Amino acid sequence: MDERVNRITAEIAAVVERNLRQELLREREAMLRKELETVRSELGRLREAGRIRPTAPRPASGIPVPEPDESKSIRNDSARALLIRTLKRAGHPMTIKELTQAIRRRGWKSERKDPSKTVDVALRHNPQDFRRTGPGTFTLNR
C-alpha cells in the first residue's frame, strides 16, 4: 500500500512540476513577445526617421520579370517569377507556406532541403515586387 501511495504521490508531483514549468514558460513567452514588439516598433520609428537602413542590400528595382508562357514548364522559371504569377492569380495575400505549396503543386523544385526558405528569401529580397502584409504573409507590390 505504501509503495502505491509513494508512486501516486510522485506522479502528482511530476504533474504539478510540469504544470508549473508550462506556466513559467507561458509568462516568459508573453514577456518576450512584448519585448519583441517594442523592439520592432522602435526599429520602425528609426527607419521612418531615416536613422537606420535595412541591413540586407536591396536589389536594383525595375528588373523586368518576363511574363511566362502558361504552356511552358515552370521548372526553369525563377522562384521570383513564379511567386509573382501565383500572387497575381490568387488576387489576395498569401503566406509563405501557401505560396510554397502552390508553386510546388505546379512542378517547381528547390535545391534546398526546406523549399520555403527559398520562397522566403525571394519575397524578402525583392521589395519592389512583394509587400509584407502580416507575419509571413505577402502580396504583390503593384
Image: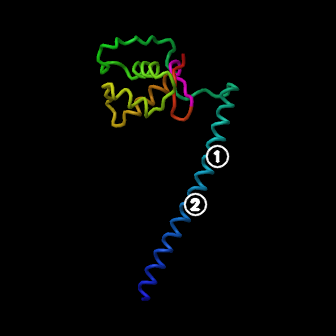
Nearer mark to the viewer, of 1 and 2: 2
Most extreme residue toward the bottom is: 1
First in sequence: mark 1 vs mark 2 = 2
Quarter assignment of residue 85: top left
Residue 23 colored in magenta in the image: no
User: Circle 1 sits on which residue?
Assistant: 34
Q: At 43% across and 32% down in the image, what residue appears? A: 98
SS at badge 2: helix
The one of 105 and 65 positioned closer to us in this rendering: 105
Image height of 102 relative to 33, above or below: above
> x, y (%) of residue 25?
56, 57
Q: Which mark is residue 138?
A: none
Image side of residue 52 versus residue 73, left or right: right
Nearest to the observer: residue 76 or residue 138: 138
Q: How far separated are the C-alphas under marks 1 and 2?
A: 17 Å
**Which residue: 67% across, 27% down?**
51
Report which residue position mark 2 lands on.
23
The magenta region covers 127-133
Point 47% across, 77% down: residue:
10
On the rendered image, what quadrant is the N terminus found in? Answer: bottom left
SS class, disc 1: helix
Residue 23 horizontal side relative to residue 88, left or right: right
Q: Amino acid at mark 1?
A: Lys
